[in-house]
Image (cartoon, grey):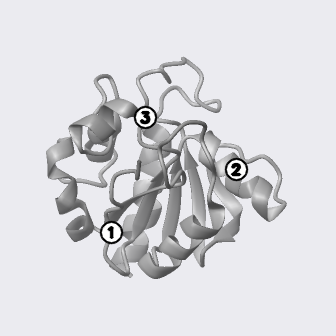
Amino acid sequence: MDVLDDIWTPGIAVAICGTAVGPCAAERGHHYAQRGNAFWTLLHASGLAPEVLTPSDEAALPALGIGLVDLVRRFDGPQRFDVRSFEDTLGRAGPGWVAFNGRVGAEAVARDLGEPRPALGRQRWTFAGARVFVLPSSSGANQRKDHGGRPDRLSWWSELATLALADRAA
């Protein structure tokens, strides 16, 4: 089955890239709809969104300069990374930043490009003409106490917001 539709308009400030839509989100018909996923809270707390949104508000994201794109283009068994299709989509969206929500997708793309395994934060490489940032996953399963040497996930999301919003203001 196809994954949920990507959400973006050309020229967005940041495309937040998930690895794959989970079964719960697919069933509910919205990105990041799983209980325990901190995506919507992190989006607001970081400054990327002016208020706490819910999965049903996802269509409002492009007006905020945010898009949602997933690396796995079909959900029918084992994850298959379609890096070329993903790159084509991002090329059409034209974001200033590609922000991977978790390391799995970032690692797949880096491997495809011949780049070393990425750490959290800003990367030295670009993808689809955009700068790359790797966020700690917003998944409820990612509740570790160590997030790349920082005390929490929010500090990484806030750093991305600072970078993306500065570009948008320029």
Q: Earlier in the sequence, mark 1 or mark 2?
A: 1
Q: Quadrant of residue 59?
A: bottom left
Q: Earlier in the sequence, mark 3 or mark 1?
A: 1
Query: The residue tagged with tag 3: helix, strand or loop?
Result: loop
The reply to whether dot 1 and dot 2 touch (C-beta < 8 Å) is no
Q: Nearer the viewer, residue 84 or 65?
A: 84
Residue 92 vs residue 39, the one in the foreground: 92
Q: Residues within 10 Å of mark 1 (few under 14, many from 20)?
A: many
In this figure, which residue is indicated by the disc labeled 1?
8
Q: Is label 2 in contact with label 3 (beta carbons under 8 Å)? A: no
User: Of the residues tagged 3 and 1, which is closer to the observer?
Assistant: 1
Question: Which quadrant of the figure contains the C terminus?
Answer: bottom left
Residue displayed at 43% across by 34% down: 138
Q: Is residue 119 left or right of residue 161?
A: right
> Which mark, residue 108?
2
Element marked by disc 1 = loop
Amino acid at the residue labelled 3: Ser
Q: Residues within 10 Å of mark 3 (few under 14, many from 20)?
A: many
Return the x and y of residue 6 as percentages of the image width and height.
36, 61
Residue type at the position of mark 1: Trp
Which numbered marker is on residue 138? 3
